[in-house]
Amino acid sequence: MREPLLPLPPALSSWVRADRAHLDAPLRDAVLTWLHAVWPFDGTRIDYAPR
């Protein structure tokens, strides 16, 4: 019998234009807040692309 596959953490990335670089951190924070509030997965395992 096969071992059950463990779910991978959700992976995401976002970006802003260079002339809006100051919005990168607020966008990341807003997306993470939304994910923690709305999606039914363990929010501590979200794999957000590094900056």
Image (tube, grey):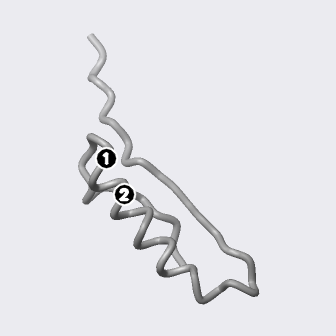
Q: Left or right: 46 with respect to 11? A: left
Quarter holding residue 21: bottom right
Q: Left or right: 1 with respect to 23? A: left
Say above or below: 29 vs 6.
below
| Secondary structure beneath label 1 | helix
Relative image position of residue 50 (x, y in whole percent): 51, 73
Quarter holding residue 41: top left
Image quarter hosting the N terminus? top left
Q: Left or right: 24 with respect to 10? A: right
Give yes or no for contact between labels 1 and 2 (Cβ–Cβ under 8 Å).
Answer: yes
Q: How many marks?
A: 2
Looking at the image, which residue is at 52% across and 66% down? 49
On residue 15, which mark appears? Answer: none
Give, as a three-letter code, the residue at label 2: Trp
Give, as a three-letter code, the residue at label 1: Val
> Would you name the residue on which mark 2 appears?
34
Front one among 7 and 27: 27
Looking at the image, which residue is at 27% across and 53% down? 37
| Secondary structure beneath label 2 | helix
> Would you name the residue on which mark 1 appears?
38
Say above or below: 25 vs 30.
below
Image quarter hosting the C terminus? bottom right
Q: Residues within 10 Å of mark 2 (few under 14, many from 20)?
A: few
Front one among 3 and 48: 48
Q: Residues within 10 Å of mark 1 (few under 14, many from 20)?
A: few
Looking at the image, which residue is at 67% across and 74% down? 16
Disc 1 from disc 2: Cα separation: 6 Å
Quarter holding residue 5: top left
**Of all residues shown, which one is farthest toward the top?**
1
Relative image position of residue 40 (x, y in whole percent): 27, 40
Looking at the image, which residue is at 33% across and 36% down? 7
